[in-house]
Image (cartoon, rainbow, N blue to C red):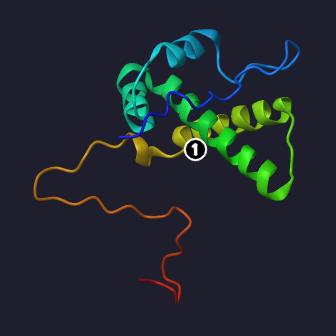
Amino acid sequence: MSDWAHASPPRLHIHSSDPALVDDDLAEHMIATRELSAKQWLLTMFDSLPHATLIRLVVTLWVIWTMRRKEIHEENYQTPLVTHQFIDRYIAELESIKRSSGVLDHAPPCVNWARLGMDSSSEWGGKDQC
């Protein structure tokens, strides 16, 4: 198990005029959670946060990692405002997909039964049937 406590946390708020990537309560919770491994820290976040907050945290961490990689390897720098807007749009798109798709809210099938999902854009009676 490696000790990652020495690693500097991502800058969640760059400048007073820039939007914070996470709200103050979540930032405090992230800082207060002390674990020796990054994996254990993330598992603790999964256990302790409400679903919507957890989604925002995971998407934010993914975007920070991606933006840092692009800055380092491709010299493609994005401002904190652009990063914040991307996170908001991405989460809004996830929510709209969940609302428009009943698949995410279905109950599991009964015992000895299987659920068959069909794409609503399938064409019946055409040459390309299964």
Q: Looking at the rendering, in which quadrant would you find the N terminus?
A: top left
Viewer-proximal residue among 51 and 15: 15
Q: Position of residue 112 (x, y in %)?
A: 10, 59
Q: In the rendered view, tell whether residue 13 sits above or below residue 117.
A: above
| Outermost left residue | 112
> Residue at point 59% right, 41% down?
94
Q: Answer above or below: position of 81 versus 1.
A: above
Give the quadrant of residue 39.
top left
> Mark 1 is on which residue type?
Ile
Could you tell me residue 57's position as x and y percent?
56, 29
- Residue linked to disc 1: 97
Crowding near pointer 1: few (<14 within 10 Å), some, many (20+)? few
| Residue occupying image coordinates x 49% and y 76% | 124
Q: Secondary structure at mark 1?
A: helix
Specify whether 67 is left or right of 124. Answer: right
Where is residue 35 shown, x and y percent of the image? Answer: 40, 25
Rendered residue at 43%/64% (across/down): 118
In the figure, 69 relative to 125: above or below?
above
Along the viewing direction, whichever of 103 and 123 lies nearer the viewer: 103
**Quarter assignment of residue 44:** top left
